[in-house]
Image (cartoon, grey):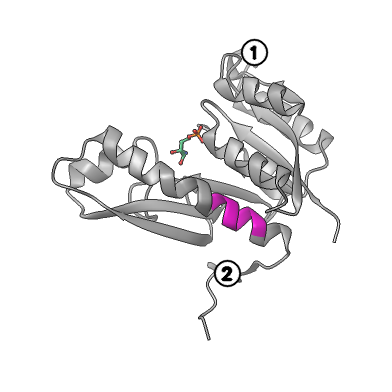
Amino acid sequence: MSKKRILIFASGRGSNAEAIHGACADGTVNGEVVGVICDHADAQVLGRAARWGVPSVVIEKKDYPDKAAFDEAILKAAVSFTPDLICLAGYMRICGENLIHAFPDRILNIHPALLPSFRGLHAQRQAVEAGVKVAGCTVHFVGTGLDDGPIITQVAVPVYDDDTEETLSARILEQEHPAYVRTVRAFCDDALHVEGHRVTGMHAKEK
Ligand code: GRF
């Protein structure tokens, strides 16, 4: 099977992007990161892409008159990479519907909460403030609503009495990287199947 072309969307640090790129580079994932689209010119992920020798494109909202024009520019850039898969990895924007319709069931996102709880920004802070005892991360296909779309995999972590947003975020992040890599690997092996809200192929019962 030929390698899947993976396009990363990121806004900041890029540690999930690094995990995906590393797994492609060492052969864990049958894919290749072909580009990075970033909405912040000073994002750390851009330095990472340069180190990998992967092209990146910066598209900043402030350079466009409105969201429709920005979404058009994003779609045009994305299509130019002819990706098989788009991975949102710390991408802090809601994708345009044009992108979602152009790549049905081909856009993944990682969210630092056990969806459908704690959608949106500061999910780890929301979890601490809500007093939940279990938190975690979710990898899902991107739908048209905020942090919705079919769930592919989730990993839970405990929340301790002395946790802060920072300590809980670090515990979740440790799980995010392998969870995202496992999901991208399954996608690139054509193992995932979407039926309505259900995704199968990741969690078969061990025999
Ligand atoms: C991660 O916690 C991810 O779940 C969230 O934003 C953070 C991005 O981290 N959407 P990084 O840029 O991948 O290091």
Q: CA distance from mark 2 to mark 1?
A: 37 Å
> Can you identify the residue that label 2 sits on?
196
Establish whether ligand 1 lies closer than 8 Å to the Cβ of label 2: no
Residue 55 versus residue 19 in the image, above or below:
above
In the rendered image, residue 114 lying in the magenta stretch gets the answer: no
In the rendered image, residue 184 lying in the magenta stretch gets the answer: yes
What range of the chain is rendered magenta? 180-185
Q: Residue furthest right?
A: 2
Image quadrant of residue 66?
top right
Which x, y percent locates residue 74?
70, 30
- The residue positioned 50% from the left and 32% from the top of the image is 92
Which x, y percent locates residue 44?
56, 21
Question: Can residue 90 be seen here?
Answer: no
- The residue positioned 58% from the left and 57% from the top of the image is 182
- The residue positioned 45% from the left and 53% from the top of the image is 138
Closer-to-camera residue (2/60): 2
Q: Residue furthest front?
A: 26
Residue 37 circle label: none
Q: Quadrant of the N terminus?
A: bottom right
Amino acid residing under circle 2 = Gly
Residue 3 versus residue 88 in the image, above or below:
below
- The residue positioned 58% from the left and 19% from the top of the image is 40
Which x, y percent locates residue 53?
77, 26
Closer-to-camera residue (78/204): 204
Mark 2 residue crowding within 10 angstroms, few (<14) / some (14–19) / many (20+):
few
> Can you identify the residue that label 1 sits on?
63
Total marks in image? 2
